[in-house]
Image (cartoon, rainbow, N blue to C red):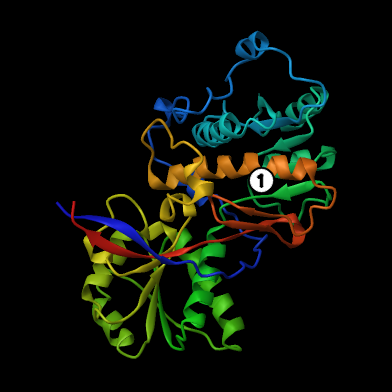
Amino acid sequence: MQRLTPLLVGVLMTWLTPTMAQTPDYIIQSNTAPLKLLGQPAPKPEAPAAAPRDASATAAKPQPAAGRLRVGLLLPTGSATLGEAAAVVRSGVEAAASVDQNAELVPISASEDTAVAGYKQALASGVNVVIGPLSRGAIAAVAPAVTVPTLALNSIGREVPANPKLFSLSLIVEGEARQVARLMHEDGRANPLLLFGADSLSQRLRQAFIDEWRVLSRGKSPLALEAKPDGLPAILQAAAGADAVFMALDAHEAGIVKAALAPELPVYGTSQLNGRGSAVALAGVRVIDMPWFLMPEHPAVKRYPRPAAALTTQTERLYALGVDAWRLAVLLAGARQPTGLRLDGVTGDLRLGRDRLFERQLPMAVLSVEQP
C-alpha cells in the first residue's frame, strides 16, 4: 500500500510579516482528535519522568532550590471548548520541561473568566515568566496585569494596550500564505494561479497571499479562481497560462485539482496539505511545515518525545507549540534585552519581531510517494 510522506529538499528562509489583525485559531477550532485519551507524553528512555500534573504530586516533591527559575503555565484545561486543545499544549510544555529540566513548571488552570485571577495566582507563587493565556479574550483581560515576561499563545489584538513584557507565539495561518508567496517569487514565478475554496480558512489564505504577492510584484495581483465542483475546465484553462499554482485548499480538494493539472506545472501549498492520509495525487507538491514534521532528525526536534497518544497532524502542532513555548519562556526569563531573540524551534525558526511577536520561518518539502 502506498503512502504519502514528506521528502525534505531544502530550507528556504523568508521572514514572515506579522498579521496582528488576523485570528489564528484555525488549528484549535478544527481539532477533531480523541484528546480525552491523551496522557503524559512518553519520555525518551534516558529522560526523567515528566512534570507532575496535580498539586498533590507537586507537594510530594522536594522544594526547588532557592533562586531556581519558575515558569507559570496558564491554560483553560477545564474549558468545554478549549480544554482539550489546552491539554495538548500542556503536554508539549511538560515534555520539554521533563527533558530540559532548567526550570520548575507551575501549572494553573484558568478559563477566560478567571484568567486574571489565575495570572495573579501565578505571580503570587513566585513565577519568573508565564506561558499563556491561550484565547484572545483571556490575553486582553490579562494584559494590564502583566508584570513578568508573559508568552501568549495567540495573537495580541490591536485593542490590547501595549505592554513591553507581553509577547506572542502563535500558529498564524496567514504567515504561511505570505511565506509561500515569497518562496514562489524567489523561485522566479511571475504568473501564479491562486486556487481557493469557500471556507473561511481558505479565504484567509487567499487574501494573505494576494496581499504579499502585490508587495513582491509591485502591485500586480495574481489570477485567483474559486475551486468549485464544476469549475475544473476553467481551472485547467487558467493553469495553461500560469507558471505555478498556489492551492489555498484542503488536502482533499487539492488532490482532485492536482491530479488534473499538467505534471510539470509547479504546485505550492501550506501545511494543511501535509497530513496523514493525504491523497497520492498530492505527490510533487511543494509545502511548508514545521521542522517537527519535516525534519524529525534535526537535533532540536529529536531531543523531545512525541505525544504518547495518537493525534491528528493538526492537533499535534499544538503539542509542538507547547514544546517551543517552554523553550522561549526560559529564554525570555533570562533575557535583559529580548529584542531580536531567536530560537531554532520545532515549530519553525523563531525570531522576535515587531510588536513582540515571534515570527516563524518554515522549511519547505516536496511531497512524494514512498513504497513501504
Spot occupied by residue 187 in the image (x, y as percentages of width and height): 46, 82
Residue 370 appears in view = yes
Rendered view: 42 above or below 148: above
Along the line of sight, which residue is nearer the eye, 372 or 91? 372
Spot occupied by residue 231 in the image (x, y as percentages of width and height): 28, 76
Please name the residue shown 75% across and 45% down the image: 332
Along the line of sight, which residue is nearer the eye, 111 or 244? 244
Rendered view: 10 above or below 124: below
Helix, strand or loop status at disc 1: helix
The residue carrying pointer 1 sits among few (fewer than 14), some (14 to 19) or many (20 or more) residues within 10 Å by Cα, namely many
Residue furthest to the front in view is 46
Spot occupied by residue 204 in the image (x, y as percentages of width and height): 52, 64
Along the line of sight, which residue is nearer the eye, 107 or 301? 301
Which quadrant of the structure image shows residue 129? top right
Spot occupied by residue 273 in the image (x, y as percentages of width and height): 37, 60
Please name the residue shown 57% across and 35% down the image: 96
Question: Disc 1 designates what residue?
Answer: 136
How many dots with numbers? 1
- Name the kind of residue labelled 1 in the image: Arg
Judged left or right of residue 341, residue 40 is: left
Rendered view: 171 above or below 111: below
Please name the residue shown 42% across and 60% down the image: 199
Judged left or right of residue 50, residue 223 is: left
Residue 134 appears in view = no
Which quadrant of the structure image shows residue 308? top left
Judged left or right of residue 272, residue 171 is: right
Please name the residue shown 47% across and 59% down the image: 201
